[in-house]
Image (cartoon, helix red, strand yellow):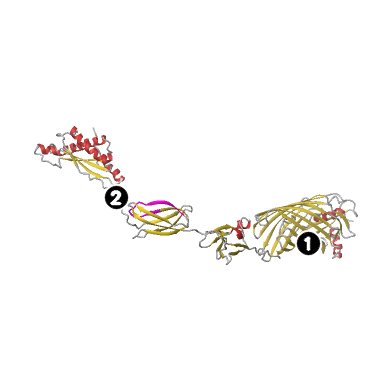
Amino acid sequence: MKRALVVLLIAVSFAFALPTLYGTRGTNLVSSARCEDMGYLWFYPSLEGYLEDVIILDTISTPGDTLRDTFDVMAANPIRLSLGFTPWHYLEFSIFGNAYFIKASDPDLGTSVSVFDMSDVGGHVKGSIPFTPLDAPTVIALGLDGFFLMTLPFEMDQTNNDSMAYYLGYNPYNQAGAEFGGKLLFSVESQYFSGHLNAGYWYRSQHMIGGSDGVAVQYPQTIVSGIGLESSPMNWLNLFADFNVDYGLTIMNADTLLAGLGTHASVGVRFPIMMGKNKGFGLMFTVAGGADPMNFGSTMSLYAGLAIGGDLIPEKEVFVEGTVYDSATGQTIPDAAVTIKTAEGDTVIYSDSLGNFTLPELEGDEIIYVEKDGYHGETVTADEILSGEYNLVEDTKLSKIQRAWLAGTVEDAETSEPLEAMVVFEKLEEDTVIDPLTTDPITGYFRLELPPGTYNITTSAEGYHDDERSLVVMAPMDTLIDVTLTPIEEPAPPPPLYPATLTGFGEGSTTLTMMQIMELEKIVEIMVDNPDATVVLVGHTDSVGSDAANLRVGARRAGSVYEFLRSRGIAANRISIETGGERFPIGDNRYRSGRDANRRVDFYFSRATTEEELTDSEHGVKPPTTK
């Protein structure tokens, strides 16, 4: 007789492989708390395979543990077929069936045997309670999954099952009674990341390994739990991982080697190829790897599956109906334009003869604009409609645009002559400017229709000061205004500035006398009264002395006047000096009177037209240096 440990070593590989829901939600062994979409049907065949070296120890023919034989085992167990349907968003049904395929070979003898047989069948019933809308960006849901399974009461390949006992040390045919259990599910799901938690209880029955005449193994009553994570960075890619922790209780005479802690972890990837919601069926290919790193007799497995699914009950397209009313009379408004604005473009529909209109299904990001000539438009968002804040049947009311006539004339304030002028209207409440108008050039008359409101009116004409006024326009009253514009007065030209001459200097003298100072006060007054004026001082002499000496004397005489003007506050940049010496006489130097007239300082005034010219005058003849 083979050692019972060998049987348990193989059987433990499937001790906690609790079948789960093989829909498109959840991970490998962790279920989502959400059900599939209403009307969703799927068929999911999957395969688990592994390779294992089996060492059989014999304690009957030889005392102690001696090596009986070794074999290579390739197994696909179980082959899982799952069929499910969701008749409602909150309820889901599925059935499944498991089969096994085992191939064992003896490397020493070069012999092998293969066996395929059915194992068990079962089903799931899942209910879901979402805490958020199912179309929200993040969905939180609580669920309950009830399941049952049982082995089939017949053996398909008894001969090969008996032959497999030579290699495995036991007959792989497994008989058991009905088993059942339930799991509490919790999920948080979003477009890119989802998490699932499961916890529950699994009632296990006694298994007969090798059929009714085989070895009886009482599986423990098991507490099951698991956590699963999945991410869908792209529509065609889903990554997932889960970790399950099960605890087998020793109650009801369970085999102690199967009781205690058991784990299973798996990671995988799925490739959904869906043809779109409510557009038929799609495919999803799954590849995953799993391991039982903490189990006694741990195994490494590879899973692969192909899901085929789609919606059998297409969701009805939801239309939104509305009616356009006149807000004052309550009468319906036909031919009103209803514009649906989206990122892809605008769609315009019109209300019928009774004011009714129908919108296609709204996604939530549209903007609806209702308008009609002669009425103020109405804007509403799709979110307001879908949330119930805005009722298209009751709330789509347009108010008529009330208008009034405004007329007036524009005249010259002094002559009362009509003027051709431009009139601009700015509506203050909306900060908008109405297209300007031009008055009649012969009559100065203007007239226009305006909606009620407060306006800022600006009237302008060339050569006149602008007229600005505020005006409240009320409907249905007509308003008349008269505008008079004041001409812009041209400034009077400044008085002319004539040259002046200061005489009275003694022979060779540059000192100013009291009489000369009195004359210079008049020059100061001219400079003060004309702040834009500049002056050039030119000093002259008689013919007594050399030409060079007389040039110096002329410069000093102009310098004396310069210093006086500066002492009276005249800016230096308004004064420049030059010397003429004896070269520009105005009298005959042969006579005393002529020489007295030639000893003089001439004043030449000019006006600086710009500040720059006034500043540039600093670069003229510099004042003399007093030694």
Q: Circle 1 — which element? A: strand
Taking the magenta stretch, the answer to whether it contains residue 464 is yes
- Of 439 and 403, which appears nearest the observer? 403
Amino acid type at circle 2 is: Glu
Q: Is residue 52 visible?
A: yes
Task: Give the image location of residue 286, x and y in percent.
Answer: 71, 60
Taking the magenta stretch, the answer to whether it contains residue 60 is no
Disc 2/disc 1 C-alpha distance (Å): 102 Å
* 569 lies left or right of 483: left
Amino acid type at circle 1 is: Ile
Q: Which residue is mark 1?
A: 95
Task: Give the image location of residue 388, x and y in percent.
Answer: 63, 56
Q: Circle 2 — which element? A: loop
Looking at the rendering, which quadrant does residue 543 occupy? top left
| Number of residues whose C-alpha sits closer than 10 Å to that of mark 1, classed few (under 14), some (14–19) or many (20 or more) | many
Q: Is residue 111 above or below residue 623?
A: below
Task: Give the image location of residue 2, x and y in percent.
Answer: 88, 55
Q: Farthest residue to the front: give it.
A: 477
